[in-house]
Image (spheres, rainbow, N blue to C red):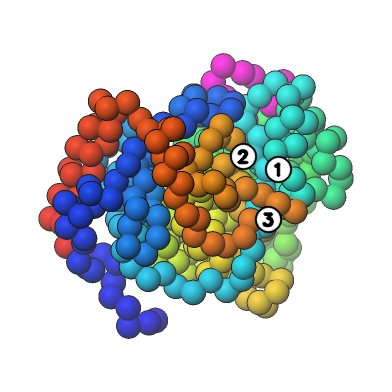
Amino acid sequence: MSDAPDPETAALPPLDEVLAALRVVAIPTRTRFRGISVREAAILDSPLGASEFSPFPEYGDGEASAWLAAALDFGWREQPAPLRDRVEVNATVPAVAADRVPEILARFPGCRTAKVKVAERSQDLADDVARVRAVREAMGPDALVRVDANGGWGVDEAVTALRALAEFDLDYAEQPCGGVDELVEVRRRLSTGDAGEIPDPLLGEATATSGSTVRTSPLVRIAADESVRKAADPLAVARAGAADLLIVKAQPLGGIRRAVGIVAEAGLPVVVSSALDTSVGIAMGLHLAAGLPLAERDGAQGAVLAGACGLGTVALLEGDVCSDPLLPRDGAIEVRRPELDPELLARYAAPAARERWWRERVARCHALLSASR
Ligand SMILES: O=C(O)CCC(=O)c1ccccc1C(=O)O
Ligand SMILES: [Mg+2]
């Protein structure tokens, strides 16, 4: 490990300095996403480059504090050096009707991986199957197709849905159910062992009755997202054997340094994603992703980057705070910190009452972080 100060004990920039650097924006989304049609974010014009604080409005201060720690770390402290200058990204397909899939995919030029939202409350399995089919047909047999249920299924529903979706040869299913125990159970029930074998949910292996061990191929790999970023203990998933890979997000995990530490300890392959951030928050995710080894290229095992990252989502916003936004090109995004554009900050400035709300939220989270150091 380096001798850089621990992010959890490093001094925070003073609140008045943070508030002086802060602007709140409200950017319409092009398509409803997670029930959101306007994305609010606090943007920090901070000493080491722009930073972003954008926990969703319904999150409590405890959870939002980790997002503030991340924003202050990225804005006020040197970051680990990136290992590469581009990060491959996936297309993100919201829970739209199947006939809108080509229009969505067109916003992600060159992407050979797509992640499709499923288990939307107002829809059913037939909607999900139709949407995933449309994505597979549009992208062809060589593309990687993932689904993300955001914990929307129960165990039985997840098993039924993932069996139905298996014909599209999924790369993985992200957070099919909400709880860690449910993920373990789904993973166990989707393990395809030959008759007489007892699938071991921890190892993805089946032990033959003779005593020899036979490798089973899971019907679909399971990725944990909310179970990592919203859990009191982000490593509980890995310890329980509840997932084949982890989705890691820099803001909810308290910043790049802390996320890298969690990934190393978990020892599972990861995909870095975002939370519908502006280009500024995306830059934080890109720097996290570009600091992790790649399985193929770097010969690493365990805590490696497991393919295209969910960092192309500026394409789902109607605007941005940077005139040279971090959008996918040739299926990847360049790793850089974008410049804030004052005109765009003004164009998307949030209403005064929302600006005040965000400033008060930052003050409360800052106080929580100060008290915990
Ligand atoms: O991972 C991606 O492709 C995009 C990011 C994404 O899906 C997302 C965006 C906002 C809130 C939650 C999620 C999620 O991964 O569940
Ligand atoms: Mg997710």
Q: Quadrant of residue 116?
A: top right
The N terminus: image quadrant: bottom left
Q: Which residues are magenta?
A: 118-128
Tell me the residue at 19%/37% (across/down).
360
Camera-nearest residue between 303 and 137: 137
Name the residue tied to disc 3.
Answer: 332
Task: Indicate the amino acid at tag 3.
Answer: Ala
Alpha carbon of mark 3 to alpha carbon of mark 1: how far? 9 Å
Camera-nearest residue between 44 and 218: 44
Look at the numbered discs 2 and 1 and tell me whether their residues touch, using CB distance below 8 Å.
yes
Q: Quadrant of residue 305?
A: bottom right
Name the residue tied to disc 2.
Answer: 315
Q: Is residue 47 above or below residue 101?
A: below
Left or right of 347, for residue 159: right
Camera-nearest residue between 206 and 269: 269
Q: Quadrant of residue 254?
A: bottom left
Extreme top residue here?
Answer: 122
Q: Secondary structure at mark 3?
A: strand
Let me know if residue 123 is in the magenta part.
yes
Alpha carbon of mark 2 to alpha carbon of mark 3: how far? 13 Å
Task: Indicate the amino acid at tag 1.
Answer: Phe
Left or right of 39, for residue 208: right
Tell me the residue at 32%/26% (across/down).
351
Name the residue tied to disc 1.
Answer: 108
Task: Indicate the amino acid at tag 2.
Answer: Ala
Let me know if residue 320 is in the magenta part.
no
